[in-house]
Image (tube, grey):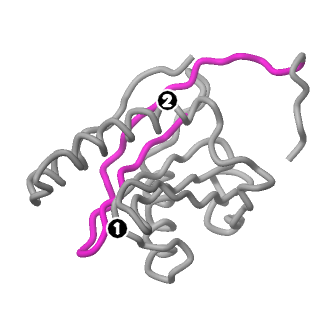
Amino acid sequence: MVETSLQDYVMKPWLVTPFPPLISQDSAIKMYSKTTFPEKLFSRESMATAGSLISEMLQEGKIKRRLGVGFGIVSDHYINVSIWGGEFPSLLNNDLFGFDKVENMRETLKPLDVKNEGTYCVWELGIVEHEVKAWKKFLHTQRKPSDLQNYIHNSFQGTLI
């Protein structure tokens, strides 16, 4: 990736769209797209591909399952997967993956080191902020299956600027 200078950085609004969560027997991952608009929007097909890749990486152990609950953010050239759990349920762990273009996401997807790439961009932190609040709300419940369903279906949608 080419680094952009502070003076050359162009501010753009970002549109965040939730997509159906990835639900399996042992995991639930909320899905978000983060795109500039109106020129770029991810199709349902692109998001389905990203979801399939995340599911495969969870099954193959390339992403640690931990509690099996979290969220994925698909943006220009990146898939950022955040999973709750570890030593404590309050920990958020993320895995970052890069790809060349949406059209060849499956063929070009590769793991990235967050020490070199960063954990989240400032705009993704708007989504993370929502998720932190929703997770804290869940942790304050009795954590019944219905409480978990409420967390899973509590998604951010809107513009980040």
Q: Amino acid at mark 1?
A: Leu
Image location (x, y in percent) of residue 109: 67, 65
Residue 31 sits above or below residue 105 on the image: above
Q: Name the foreground residue: 144 vs 149.
A: 144
Which residue is at 35% across, 67% downward?
A: 68
User: Could you tell me which residue is drawn at 41 percent across and 71 percent down?
Assistant: 66
**Circle 2: residue type:** Gly
- Left or right, 47 with respect to 3, comes to left
Q: Label 1 neighbourhood size at 10 Å, few (<14), some (14-19), many (20+)?
A: some
Which image quadrant for residue 65? bottom left
Q: Earlier in the sequence, mark 2 or mark 1?
A: 1
Mark in the foreground, 2 or 1: 1
Q: For the residue labelled by badge 2, is the local secondary structure a helix, a strand or a loop?
A: helix
Q: Write the residue at 31% across / 68% down.
A: 27
Task: Report the front residue among 157 and 84.
Answer: 84
Could you tell me how far apart the alpha carbons at marks 2 and 1 are, in whole angstroms? Answer: 23 Å
| Residue 33 on the magenta span | yes
Which segment did they paint magenta? 8-34
User: Where, quadrant-wise, is the C terminus in this rendering?
Assistant: top right
**The furthest residue to the front:** 87
Answer with left or right where residue 114 lies relative to residue 151.
right
Q: Position of residue 48 (x, y in %)?
A: 43, 57
Residue 97 position, x and y percent, is 65, 59
**In this view, 67 is above or below 81:** below
Q: Which mark is residue 126?
A: 2
- Direction bottom: furthest residue: 60
Q: Tell me the crowding category of disc 2: few under 14, some 14 to 19, or many 20 or more residues within 10 angstroms, Cα based.
A: some
